[in-house]
Amino acid sequence: MRTLRMAAAGALLPLALLAGLAPAPARAYGTAFRHEAFTVRLPAGWRVAEPKPGPKGRRFVPAKKARAAESARVVHFADGRGNYFTVHVDRAADLEADAIWTVHASADGASVDVGAEGAPCTGGGACSAGNGTLEIGTLPPLRFGAHTFTFEFGNTEREQGVSLEPHRWILRSFRAR
């Protein structure tokens, strides 16, 4: 009987180790930020940020007055490793970008569905390819209730090899209020 218990415990050990390596479910990922017009969930380590001049243009640092972002028309979030995500509220996003993603309002009328992740541009027009930073914008502007929203995100330190999963996750967590 003792041998059977030890064998069963030995069989469960690899399963327990694999379970420990599995990623956490998305719903448990991050903390909520509440703006007067929307909410988003932020991955661990992401904070309300403000832009500062940097060697490649701009960079983002933790906001000195993070609570002011709760009613701002442009709200920046960053992870301290170059990744950023910006929400424009009732304000057009005028930017050059490496790619444009198409978005639309989801069936619930308060969240965002990604229609297509546009391919990186190759130059010309409003294309920023080759500048050493990654910039992605969304179109069209989305109208939820009394507000219109556009989004931009990317990485201020690298243009290639950037994981877009945190950006996708924040965009999909967006909820208009």
Image (tube, rainbow, N blue to C red):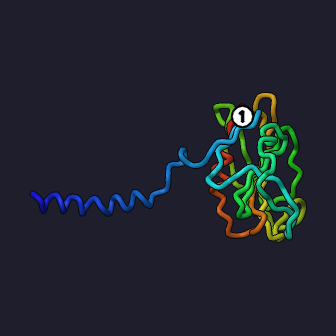
Residue at image coords 14%, 59%:
4
Taking 18 as reference, is 150 above or below it? Answer: above
Residue at image coords 89%, 65%:
124
Residue at image coords 61%, 53%:
44
Residue 91 screen position, x and y as percent = 87, 41
Residue 93 screen position, x and y as percent = 86, 48
Residue 58 screen position, x and y as percent = 85, 62
In the rendered image, the quadrant that contains the N terminus is bottom left
Q: Quadrant of residue 33?
A: top right
Nearest the eye: 166 or 142: 166
Nearest the eye: 120 or 130: 130
Residue at image coords 12%, 62%:
3
Q: Quadrant of residue 7?
A: bottom left
In the rendered image, the quadrant that contains the C terminus is top right
Residue 45 visible = yes
Nearest the eye: 152 or 21: 21
Secondary structure of residue under mark 1:
strand
Horizontal placement of 107 versus 78: left or right?
Answer: left
Horizontal placement of 5 versus 135: left or right?
Answer: left
* Location of mark 1 (residue): 176
Q: Residue furthest front?
A: 64
Residue 72 screen position, x and y as percent = 83, 40
Residue 152 visible = no
Which amino acid does the dot numbered 1 rest on? Ala
